[in-house]
Amino acid sequence: QVRLVESGGGLVQPGGSLRLSCEASGDIVSIGTMVWYRQAPGMPRESVAIIRSNGESLYADSVKDRFTISRDNSKRTMYLQMNDLQPEDTAVYLCHAMIQTNHDAQIYWGQGTRVTVSS
């Protein structure tokens, strides 16, 4: 069974930093594109950053130059380094990945990790 587990969320003051991780486990053959999403209360889920299997990355305008997405394929883990956090970054952050197993390829979601930016 494939699982995605996020970690690294917490409470931080404006201007602070956090590093999120998303680790995949299970019967995995390969992992394709991975995405960090976030969902704030009462708001639609939005894509924050995308990283392809070759390392190519894309960012939402709202986080460009503050957030950095990366992945370590040997550890089956994706990261999101978040700097200069602002109150509007408060949300549950979820990871999403296209994963190939011995049986099929499908999209998996993690349960999320909460980030709160407040003084």
Image (cartoon, rainbow, N blue to C red):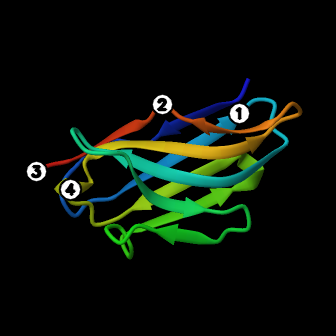
Neighbours of disc 1 within 10 Å: few (<14), some (14-19), many (20+): some
Q: Which mark is residue 119?
A: 3
Position above or below: 70 against 7 = below
Which comes sooner in the sequence, label 4 or label 1?
1
Residue 62, disc? none
In space, the residues marked 2 and 1 are separated at their CA atoms by 14 Å
Quarter occupied by residue 1: top right
Residue found 25% across the figure and 44% down from its top: 43
Q: Earlier in the sequence, mark 3 or mark 2?
A: 2
- Name the mark nearer the viewer: 3 or 4: 4
Q: What type is the residue that disc 1 sits on?
A: Ser
Say whether residue 40 is left or right of residue 24: left
Q: Are marks 2 and 4 in contact (CB under 8 Å)?
A: no
For marks 4 and 1, give the CA distance.
31 Å
SS label for mark 2: loop
Residue 103 lies, in percent from the top left, at 86, 30
Q: Which mark is residue 25?
A: 1
Q: Which residue is mark 4?
A: 88
Q: What's the CA distance linking mark 3 and mark 1?
A: 36 Å
Q: The disc labelled 4 sits on which kind of residue?
A: Glu
